[in-house]
Amino acid sequence: MAHQLPPYAAYASPQAAIARAKLTGPAIGLIVAAAVNLLLIVLRFVLGVLEVPPPPPNVDPDAVVAYQVGFRAMMAMIALGGITNVLTLLGGIMMLQQRMRGLAMTGAILAMLPCLSCCWPLGLGMGIWALVVLSDGQVRAAFQGR
């Protein structure tokens, strides 16, 4: 019977352990930032902002059309924010698993975009931290070594 290494053996080398320690903080930060944003986006939709509120009485019909278009554009931005926050969440998870460095980088960059996030300052800080860590030589080697 052949001896099999346990699943955590990939982290047995000192370099991999150092990389994992560096990745844990920013990865959890990205996950938290994305989760908070997703929760707020879901709350917006649950609270009934999907329907266009009625316009005030005695308003010019052209203004009503512009109002409705603007409202739908706002909803599209919220939906786009949901998509980008899902990618940020997945990027943080991939950072924890030391897999798919490209997705982790994408998630870090998307976390820093101010127009698509309710908690932009948190995402900005976590995104910068994640990019700095993902650019580290030991961390790059850990991603390539898997």
Image (tube, grey):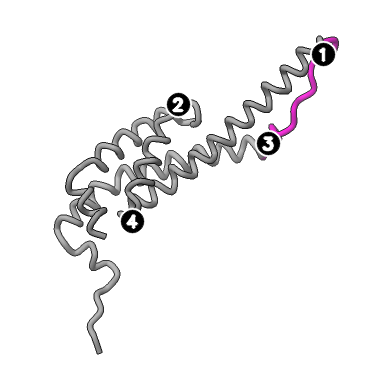
Number of residues whose C-alpha sits closer than 10 Å to that of mark 4, classed few (under 14), some (14–19) or many (20 or more): some
Number of residues whose C-alpha sits closer than 10 Å to that of mark 2, classed few (under 14), some (14–19) or many (20 or more): some
Of marks 4 and 1, which one's residue comes earlier in the chain? 1
Judged by depth in the image, the label closer to the viewer, 3 or 2, is 2
| The N terminus - image quarter | bottom left
- Residue located 24% across and 64% down the image: 10
Q: Which mark is residue 142?
A: none
Local SS, label 4: helix
In the picture of the structure, the residue carrying the numbered disc 3 is 47
Of marks 1 and 3, which one's residue comes earlier in the chain? 3
Of marks 2 and 1, which one's residue comes earlier in the chain? 1
In the picture of the structure, the residue carrying the numbered disc 4 is 97
In the picture of the structure, the residue carrying the numbered disc 2 is 114
* Of 123 and 135, the residue lying toward us: 135
- Residue located 65% across and 37% down the image: 45
Separation (CA) of disc 2 from disc 1: 33 Å
Number of residues whose C-alpha sits closer than 10 Å to that of mark 3, classed few (under 14), some (14–19) or many (20 or more): few
Separation (CA) of disc 2 from disc 4: 27 Å
In the picture of the structure, the residue carrying the numbered disc 1 is 61
Of marks 3 and 2, which one's residue comes earlier in the chain? 3
